[in-house]
């Protein structure tokens, strides 16, 4: 039984790391998009998109590190992904970020639905997953709203 629990904890960490990496990719894309925008639009991007993803990324990293530490599992360090080339333009960068956030949210939702966090008995991790998902809730809608005025 201890072997199964240990495997479950490693699987959980791996899934959380994958979602965290996607949030990091979204941050990188949003950072490049920000640099391409006029000041009012950049401020809106920062408030509505970048800020929530940045908070979610940090919260996901803390959840990962805390869980690994509580169970004596090896933890990895998350590095900010390399900045993307702006060849896709601001619209493409924001759409890419929205896709990455949606994938991260889907992965976290599947993780929660799997009941794995409950099975390994970690309320702190469950709370962390819920907080990350709450922070990115509605991201796609906010991204579409921001993009609505582009290209006109």
Image (tube, grey):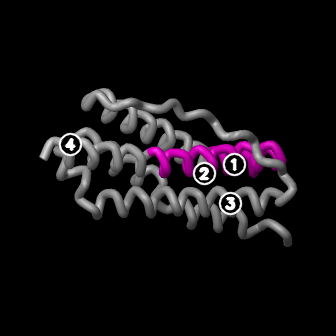
Q: Residue at x 51, y 30 (%)?
A: 77
In the displayed structure image, the side of residue 31 where residue 75 appears, left or right: left
Label 4 – label 1 distance at C-alpha: 32 Å
Mark 1 vs mark 3, foreground winner is 3
Mark 3 and mark 4 residues within 8 Å of each other at the beta carbon: no
Res 55 visible: yes
Q: Which residue is drawn at 20% across and 44% down?
A: 3
Report crowding for label 2: few under 14, some 14 to 19, many 20 or more residues within 10 A (C-alpha): many
- Residue 22 among magenta residues: yes
* Label 2 vs 4, first from the N-terminus: 2
- Tell me the number on the disc at residue 123: 4
Residue 63, image x and y in percent?
36, 37
Label 1 – label 3 distance at C-alpha: 9 Å
**Looking at the image, which is closer to me, 118 or 133?**
118
- Tell me the number on the disc at residue 30: 1
Q: What element carries label 4?
A: helix
Mark 2 and mark 1 residues within 8 Å of each other at the beta carbon: yes
* Label 2 vs 3, first from the N-terminus: 2
Q: Residue at x 61, y 61 (%)?
A: 98
Residue 130, image x and y in percent?
33, 51
Residue located beneath label 2 in the image? 49
- Residue 101 among magenta residues: no
* Label 1 vs 3, first from the N-terminus: 1
Residue located beneath label 3 in the image? 96
Residue 8, image x and y in percent?
27, 49
């Amino acid at each position: 039984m201890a072997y199964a629990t240990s495997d479950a904890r490693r699987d959980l960490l791996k899934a959380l790391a994958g979602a965290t990496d996607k949030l990091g990719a979204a941050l990188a894309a949003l950072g490049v998009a920000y640099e391409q925008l006029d000041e009012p639009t950049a401020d809106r991007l920062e408030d509505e998109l970048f800020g929530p993803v940045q908070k979610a990324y940090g919260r996901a990293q803390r959840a990962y590190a805390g869980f690994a530490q509580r169970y004596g599992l090896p933890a990895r360090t998350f590095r900010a992904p390399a900045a993307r080339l702006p060849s896709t333009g601001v619209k493409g960068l924001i759409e890419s970020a929205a896709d990455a956030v949606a994938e991260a949210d889907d992965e976290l939702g599947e993780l929660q639905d799997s009941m794995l966090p409950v099975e390994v008995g970690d309320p702190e991790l469950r709370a962390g997953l819920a907080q990350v998902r709450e922070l990115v809730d509605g991201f796609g809608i906010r991204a579409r709203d921001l993009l609505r005025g582009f290209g006109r």
